[in-house]
Image (tube, rainbow, N blue to C red):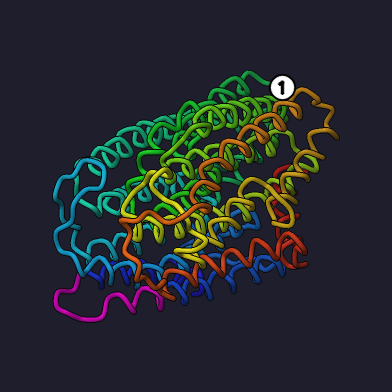
């Protein structure tokens, strides 16, 4: 019952948002998010206790790995929903607006459609994070694309339309390649004696992978993982498959950008991790791990190149997401101690990046510019958002005492323990370049005097400041202490990946 509600509460809420009439849709969104978060917490507790929970004939059957990303999606949905109440109230004041980049007039999409798609988006991510069925996982990731595209196009102007079509086209090609990976995996196990027709395909495929060790079927298994990595890696934002990500993240409303970066990318990562689990069972962890390390380093290097000199502060955060997806891929590929660091890194990155995008939305509302050169004196003009912007920068680049420092240091320790010295050097070099590249625009925005053309009278709304402040405190707290329940869940997740 709990898992069924977890999936259907946001789904039914999304349908309800389309009910015509002037009724309070906005207050319903945080209520739905709170219910979903409570149900996710109950699911996490059940998984930790070792209870075997399932629903819908076994299609929903979460494990420690999936429940981490489920809980993150719920927390970010709750933060985004509270932020959305203030954001949509501000958007309602101006029916016709002007595109700050090209000067064109535009209107927003209907609010009912926006709220509905936000609920459908969370329902799709719930399916992805709770199902052991690789087909259902693929369907869920495809549904996240369809549900989030209207969210990116909320501001109906040319730039957001271009970003939306780019997102749809590139991610759809990636999802098609992932489907081919699923098909090739079925081909690899075609002659296996294991029953592959149940809902728990993950366990069945892992058992089948053990039975085909050392046979010609491993060639099909390797080909399947390559297609899964390229397909889901496109949605995850791994370089050079990341080209949709900077445009979509920069054009979407800030709370949508936060959920795209903090929750959606994790869902795509989970698709890759399921493939990696099967490769580990088949004795091919070295093959899949080396590919993950390669794409991880490539993503970090690509992000470093584009972050240096980047003046568009939302695109800066988008390229930072490419970097951190690379760090996650690298940690998983290295294995060992780095796996626990990677799982902790996924948690801290999601919380931090969502916080930064929410604060970026506050800055955009105040300055009506996406250029870091046009924003000055945040510490005086917007003291709360300025403090959160500074704290978020320190967190995202891995400065102590924030949680990302602990996770990145743990990953580095794991890399050295594996004996990959050159990988460690590349990892450290990319982190150093990105630190310098991000510090220049962020400090430029925080320091100095506010521009003269910015109205002096301005007060920061509690709706738009409280959610990122809570996320910031959570990341700060993880830098000092990882709670026992979280450490236990992260260790269980790492164990599923061979730690």
Q: Residue 221 vs residue 290: left or right?
A: left
Q: Residue at x 76, y 54 (%)?
A: 491
Q: Residue 252 vs residue 397: left or right?
A: left
Position of 55 relative to 377 (above/below): below
Q: Quadrant of the C terminus?
A: top right
Check residue 256 for magenta coloring.
no
Image coordinates for residue 143, horizontal then vertical, percent: 35, 50
Image coordinates for residue 94, horizontal then vertical, percent: 18, 65
Image coordinates for residue 209, horizontal then vertical, percent: 65, 34
Determine the secondary structure under disc 1: loop
Magenta residues (range)? 18-32
Number of dots carrying numbers: 1
Q: Residues within 10 Å of mark 1 (few under 14, many from 20)?
A: few
Q: In this view of the protein, which residue sits in the foreground, 56 or 150?
A: 150
Q: In this view of the protein, which residue sits in the foreground, 412 or 184?
A: 412
Position of 201 relative to 231 (above/below): below
Query: Which residue in the protein does label 1 denote?
Result: 214
Q: Residue at x 75, y 51 (%)?
A: 406
Residue 142 in sight from this viewpoint: no
Q: Residue at x 46, y 64 (%)?
A: 382
Q: In this view of the protein, which residue sits in the foreground, 246 or 292?
A: 246
Q: Residue at x 65, y 57 (%)?
A: 64
Image coordinates for residue 166, horizontal then vertical, percent: 30, 35
Q: Residue 149 vs residue 301: left or right?
A: left
Check residue 26 for magenta coloring.
yes
């Amino acid at each position: 019952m709990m898992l069924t509600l977890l999936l259907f509460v946001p789904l039914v809420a999304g349908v309800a948002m389309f009910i015509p009439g002037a009724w309070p849709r906005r207050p319903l969104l945080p209520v739905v998010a709170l219910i979903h978060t409570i149900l996710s917490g109950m699911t996490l507790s059940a998984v930790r206790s070792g209870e075997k929970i399932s629903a819908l004939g076994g299609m929903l059957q979460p494990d420690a790995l999936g429940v981490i990303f489920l809980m993150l999606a719920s927390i970010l949905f709750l933060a985004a929903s509270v932020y959305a109440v203030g954001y949509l109230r501000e958007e309602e004041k101006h029916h016709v607006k002007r595109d700050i980049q090209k000067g064109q007039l535009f209107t927003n999409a209907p609010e009912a459609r926006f709220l509905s798609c936000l609920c459908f988006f969370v329902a799709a991510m719930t399916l992805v994070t709770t199902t052991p069925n690789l087909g259902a996982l693929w369907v869920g990731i495809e549904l996240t694309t369809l549900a989030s595209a209207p969210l990116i196009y909320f501001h109906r102007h040319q730039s957001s339309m271009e970003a939306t079509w780019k997102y749809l086209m590139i991610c759809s090609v990636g999802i098609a390649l992932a489907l081919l990976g699923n098909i090739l995996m079925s081909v690899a196990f075609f002659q296996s004696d294991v029953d592959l027709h149940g809902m728990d395909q993950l366990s069945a495929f892992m058992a089948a992978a053990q039975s085909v060790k050392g046979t010609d079927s491993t060639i099909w298994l390797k080909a399947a993982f390559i297609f899964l990595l390229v397909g889901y890696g496109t949605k995850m934002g791994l370089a050079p498959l990341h080209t949709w990500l900077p445009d979509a993240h920069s054009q979407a409303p800030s709370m949508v950008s936060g959920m795209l970066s903090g929750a959606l990318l994790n869902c795509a990562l989970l698709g890759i991790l399921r493939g990696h689990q099967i490769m580990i069972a088949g004795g091919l962890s070295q093959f899949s791990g080396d590919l993950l390390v390669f794409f991880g380093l490539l993503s970090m290097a690509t992000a470093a190149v584009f972050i240096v000199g980047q003046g568009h502060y939302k695109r800066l955060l988008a390229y930072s997401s490419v970097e951190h997806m690379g760090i996650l891929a690298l940690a998983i590929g290295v294995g060992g101690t780095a796996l626990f660091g990677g799982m902790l890194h996924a948690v801290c990155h999601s919380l931090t990046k969502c916080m930064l995008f929410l604060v970026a939305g506050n800055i955009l509302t105040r300055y009506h510019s996406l250029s870091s050169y046009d924003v000055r004196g945040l510490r005086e003009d917007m003291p709360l958002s300025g403090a959160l912007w500074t704290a978020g920068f320190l967190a995202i680049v891995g400065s102590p005492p924030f949680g990302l420092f602990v996770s990145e240091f743990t990953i580095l320790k794991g890399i050295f323990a594996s004996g990959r010295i050159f990988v460690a050097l590349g990892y450290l070099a990319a982190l150093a370049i990105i630190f310098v590249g991000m510090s220049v625009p962020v400090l430029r925005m925080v320091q100095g005097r506010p521009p003269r053309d910015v109205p002096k009278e301005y007060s920061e709304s509690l709706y738009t400041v409280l959610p990122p402040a809570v996320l910031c405190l959570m990341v700060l707290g993880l830098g000092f202490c990882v709670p026992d329940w979280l450490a236990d869940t992260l260790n269980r997740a790492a164990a599923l990946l061979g730690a």
